[in-house]
Amino acid sequence: MHDLYSFLTGPIAAFSLIVFFGGMLFKILNMVYTVYRKERFILSYISLRYGLRSLVHWLTPFATENMRQHPAMTAVTFLFHICLLLVPVFLLSHIVLMEELLDIRWLALPDSAADGMTAMVVGGCIFFLARRIISPEVRYLTSASDYFLLALVVLPFLSGFYAFHQWPGYPYAVIFHILSGEILLIAIPFTRLSHMIVGLLTRVYTGSEFGKVRQAKDW
Amino acid sequence: MLPIGGCQMNQTKNWDWNTAEKIVSLKEWGDEANWVEDFQISGDGEQVAAIVNIGPEEFSVRTGNGQWDTSFDKIWNLRFLLDGRLAAFVSIDGEWTVAVDDNPWENRFEYVWNLVSSQDGAHIAAAFQADRKYGMVQDDAPWEQTYYNISEMAMSPDGSHTAASVQTVSLNEGEIGKFAAGVFTAALNGKAWNRNFTNVWKVAFHPSRESIAAEIRLGRSDYTIAVDGIPWNRNYNAVWEPCYDPATGAVTAPVRIGSAWYLAENGDILWDRGFVQLWHHLFSPDSRKIAAVVATDFGKWTIAVDGKPWRVNFDELVMDPVFSPDSQKLAAIVKNRGQWSIAVDGKVWDSHFDMTWKPVFSPDSQFAAVAVESEGGYTFALNGRIWNDRYQAVRDPVFSPSGDKMLLRYIHDGRYFRKVISTGDFPS
Amino acid sequence: MTEPVVKTDGHPENPQESPIKDEGLEAGVANLSGDRIEKVIHQILKDETAARFKAYIETCVHCGLCSNACHFYLSNDKNPAFSPAGKVKQTIWEMMKRKGRVAPDSIRRMSEIAHTECNLCKRCSMYCPFGIDIAYMMLVVRRICHKLEVTPLYIQDTVNSHSATMNQMWVKEDEWVDTLQWQEEDAREEIPDIRIPLEKEGAEIMYSVIAPEPKFQAELIYQAAILMKTAGVDWTMPATPGWDNSDMAMYTGDNEIMGRLKRKHFETAMRLRVKKIVMGECGHAFRSVYDMGNRWLGWRMPPVRIVHAIEFYYDLLKAGKIKIKKKYQEPVTLHDPCNVSRGGGLHEKARYVVNAICENFTEMHPNREHNYCCAAGGGVINCGPPYKLNRMRGNRVKADQIADTKAKIVIAPCHNCHSGLEDISRHYKLDVEIKFLINILYEVMEKPSQE
């Protein structure tokens, strides 16, 4: 058990981080290269000012018309994504692991806060799941892969939550948590979860086209 | 405008290069008519003319020698030909024809338009419509065969032939299958090619033989060039206007393969590199070089000579390339960041303008001159130097056969000026 | 069966009626084989799309948030098949899932979806959190259909006209010049020395229109001529092909013809040495000359400045070159055409013009960039009568939007919007009159003859 733990938090963790960062980096570089090679016109329309203007609006809660039309979705989406990004990075036990692995450390979230935020991620996933099932326009677009991705995201948080509270059999939950977290990291560059970076780029491009060429807002 | 700027030396040698200034007052033209339209100036600068309204639906032509004897219901497209004759489309009792120097042609039509002329101006032709059928009329001789529609009218350089894209079969709206199968072809002197195509555009003449080439489209997505009705044996994603090699008679055209444009000759790729855009290709006077307007990248325009682009590029446009008579230089209009200028062999003039016309080379190829708009008026520029005065209207400058003098034609303050200056008169 | 009234729930007509018959689609589908479909899909998706397409596919998280952007979706009782992503699902996703092995009948349906159930209005780009350009995805579908020759008949015929005559309505070269001269003659009854200057090299402005103007609405050219004369504008119109700025080829994915049209248009303006092209009140033509056609040819921005009529009127009014006798009194509302507001940012200038010429202006809601499309644009109305009923059902929200303003005059500075809103007014018995800005401007401005 302990060997497995060491293996997962050592080489496999390193591997998953390398795949995640390397994969995302490759994805972005490949995208830019493909644009340069085949759609160079896009580069000539990219505008930092208008791209960021659009991005800022879409990263600010309720700053866009569509966000205001879906208040619950907007609130959940923002909380979910904030927690999703903060908890893994600022969780004390993760930081301790990173210190062991790379000898670097940074400030940690209080455990109670991290616990609550994890619950929010899980809650967010439940909300998204419910929305996929209940809302006709979302159900129409939904296929097995969407549930799969949702599961991929929720499992590390669910298991982490379980392990943190040391509920029965939690050592297994720890192993499951680490494994599922690593699978998630590895999966991001190869699935629609890559929207975490690519979505910013598409937004910047659209913002540029709307702002610079069409002289209109896109929010 | 008919190409007056590019006059041949044998045409300009008999012109008056000695009188410094000739002036025609135009003020009374307006006083004696209800209104005056469309001032025209002859190539040699000796004549000026305009359409005048002299009564309700009554128009005539006023020249320096007085008014035409005839008046018409309507006149448009008044133009001086290169041989000094004055042509216009005129309406007589609801019928249209061409009038040359006050003499309407015998043939009358329901409509005439699109005047084309031979290089020396001695021959002219126009498109006509009569009884909903279309053709061309050349020096008052209409085509025997007429068609359902006509476009892309052209005349051979020597004026002996006319050609156009024509519709040989009637087509009702919505007949997309019939359209794709082909209702268009090209007609030379009124005689249609024996095969139809989906589209036929840009009819180009052989410089000396009775031969034409055109862009054709076969079905919805295949394009190629046809020469005298026979398509090249390869299709492309798109093509632009063909041009004959004056030396060999081979046909060249820009063709699109994938998303890049190449220059092809008789169906084979001529230049080894492709461009984002490639058009307006032309041969040097000695036929040894081919130049074209190209985009080396998205939004980067320049000139390529024999496939090699200039080192500079321009973000808005490059147009009207012209070779010097010795074939050694090439000038073109360039527009970059909203400013117009002239570039010669990749070097841009220091001066820039609000608008420029096509550059003209001196016979010795040493000078390039151009009519420009600058600082609220029209004027001239010579190798980047700008003439002092601004006028209300100007025409292309013309060089004397020896190249040391220039003819400036302009209208200012109700007067027309024909001025002969020395090229040295230009401020440095 | 009676025509439906505003704010009904559900379709008054039976949704199960026989499928639409379109000869263009039928003939095209009859010539399809599985191999050809696969080859074309593969060619377009592999060679003609690249990083942008891939990013859109990989970024879409199937959240459905684009749905509310679409008037088809809203008007069809939130039927998810009409949502923007829903249309991508039925077309692009299907093609990708089947690796191009799509049945001919499916291509027919995909062509219908892409050509007649999406106006390419780009409103959904403003609702998608990632700014995915779903209009572009629909254009990719149209491009595939073009290559497969499965394009609705009416719009294909229009593209054929474009290719043969360089205008959208088979207007022959003589008819064009003749019409201008006839309009000039008519206008001389009002202002004796008025001109429609043909082929005037070096004029400040080339005025360009779409072919329905000389064909059916010549009074618009007449009114423009009076406006130009009144404002003392130095303008011209070409006597050659290249005068028409419209472009249905852009909407069938026939990019090669689009490029050819726009080249002709720009080169005509350059031949006339004009400083700018002022275009009549048309939206799609603005998109074609300002955004799409120029790009295909390699021009980052149009090589000749493009000034839409809205901006032109704005400039003239602002500079005091046009004076208003008495403002128009009838209550009016303004429809923002997608291609000039979302596509050109002209909505505030449009309001300036409307307020300058009209006394009683009521906004419709939503407005400006968020205005609902007329459902005619994007080539949809050009697909012709077979799709008219779907187009009407697909824009109940527009009818509600107009009805709520209580205005009896709707100003629509775009030809497609104009026709589309007239259809909506008739279908939903709104009894509103659709006007161009110039119709009102012509009526209320001081003219030289009256001084």
Image (cartoon, coloured by chain):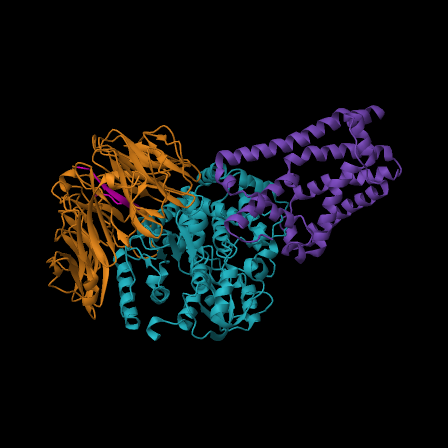
Q: Give percent across and percent down for residue B325.
A: 22, 34
Chain orange in the figure, letter: B
Residue at 47%, 70% in the rendered image = C357
Q: Colour of chain A?
A: purple
Left or right? Give the position of A125 relative to C273: right
Viewer-side residue, C50 vs B41 = B41
- Nearer the observer, B130 or B193: B130
Residue located at (54% from left, 50% from top): A210
Q: Position of residue C51 (x, y in %)?
A: 54, 38
Hey, which quadrant is residue B328 in on the image? top left
Report the magenta residues as a range.
Answer: B193-207
User: From the viewer's perspective, is C60 left or right of C314?
Assistant: right
Return the x and y of residue C201 as percentages of the image width and height.
29, 53
Query: Is C443 included in the stretch rendered in magenta?
Result: no
Question: Does B206 lie within the magenta span?
Answer: yes
Front-most of B9 and C332? B9
The colour with which the image depicts chain C is: cyan
